[in-house]
Image (tube, rainbow, N blue to C red):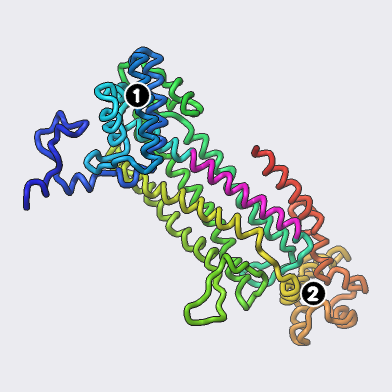
Amino acid sequence: MSKDTNASANPAAKLWGGRFSEATDAFVERFTASVNFDQRMAMEDIQGSLAHAQMLSEVGVLTADEYQQIDGGLRAIAGEIEAGEFPWSVQLEDVHMNIEARLTERIGATGKKLHTGRSRNDQVATDIRLWLRGRIDLIGAELTRLQEGLVELAEREADTIMPGFTHLQSAQPVTFGHHLLAWNEMLSRDYERLMDCRKRVNRSPLGAAALAGTSYPIDRARTAELLGFDAPTENSLDSVSDRDFAIEFCAFSALLLTHLSRASEELVLWTSSQFDFIDLPDRFCTGSSIMPQKKNPDVPELVRGKTGRVNGHLVALLTLMKSQPLAYNKDNQEDKEPLYDAADTALDCLRAFADMVPALKPKKANMLAAAAQGFSTATDLADYLVRKGVAFRDAHEIVGQSVSFAIEQGADLAELSLEQLQQFSDAIGGDVFEVLTLEGSVAARDHIGGTAPSQVRAACARAKRSIAARG
């Protein structure tokens, strides 16, 4: 095997090559390089460098002419990247060194001054935070769009009765609008978690340098301001080694996908012929290559499946960080691909749901018929007896006996005659049938958080105000 195959270019060609007398092994060079995936942070890297150069000029480390050269060169490189014309090189290892080498190629020795007062350690930490902040804002917007569509649908379906389940068995009647608002509550907590995570993402590590700060008279508050960060980070060691914000984001993503997966599972069930509660538009489904009658709910199935990979990314990052001593270690190169994919997957799943949910069409007659099965108003009969002065445990026993009798008769409680019901309790009167109807059952839950249509509409109004207040 030739020497060229075993080793990369002369070590002096590396921006850090002064210390080395032997070229990097070619396989090691490919193995350790990150440019193939971290180049997606190129615009954030340039954004950070523009702010760093401006600060260096303001504190007198760069002359005005040097700053103008660097600023113009970086903006020209940004144009090359946007046009797809940038010459990425694995030999230059990562996005940072590729851009810095290209800057020096374009403007000469002045380009070598850009890195004054910083390290790749604080540079990459800054880039990741800038990139993630942008993704958080996109995800927040999609989450809001999904909630808006969800609440609108809930309001339209405030009177639509369906069975509520425990243990996947019919329990009590609820409204479809009430059920959708349960999804919205999960997503509201997700939004709160996302915005809380953003606060900890939005701190600037730039200027922490390799691990101890720098002897140059830098102004970290100024670069934080230029980059839209709330403040600089407080400790240089922690600044370059902290990946809590990435773990926290992946934890948010795992919970978000868990919630979307639960909703997906219900959609898969509801679109089945066994339930037949929902019509999912064709554009969110696919067919079978062999069974022409099939209409498969692929979008919710995929969202349900993608939850596993996002959960895996959270575990991967936790495992990555658990044994690292301070400060930066090469292990941290492995933080980016899980983080990128978690953000991409969360965003894609939200977009799919935000498009799909407003298009859901409930099959109201099927929902109503299902709610009438399984003695879903049994609890209402027990509550009725309690209001008549019967102790709850006695009422529970009376209703259990009534249900057993109804099963023997092949009838629902509402289909039994007054005489048949009264054999179990003298407290039962002719007004009992008002509480045994599905409409009466849901209307009776008339309190905040209840399934009464009036409460569903009130909850929708509150949800709309809360979402609108996000600005």
Q: Which residue is mark 1?
A: 70
Residue 326 shows up from this direction? no
Coordinates of residue 110 in the picture (x, y in percent): 28, 21
Above/below status of 390 relative to 213: below
Dot 2, how many residues are within 10 Å of its Cα: few (below 14), some (14-19), or many (20+)? Answer: some
452 sits to left or right of 51: right
Q: Which residue is at the far right?
A: 430
Check if residue 446 falls in the magenta segment. Answer: no
Sequence-earlier tag: 2 or 1: 1
Label ID, residue 398: 2
Q: Amino acid at mark 2?
A: Ile
In the figure, residue 113 lies in which quadrant? top left
Report how far apart the C-alphas of labels 2 and 1 lie in the structure.
84 Å
Coordinates of residue 333 in the picture (x, y in percent): 31, 43
Question: Where the C terminus falls, by quadrant?
Answer: top right
The residue range painted magenta reads: 134-156
Coordinates of residue 38 in the picture (x, y in percent): 34, 43
Residue appearing at x 72%, y 76% in the figure = 374
Q: Amino acid at mark 1?
A: Ile
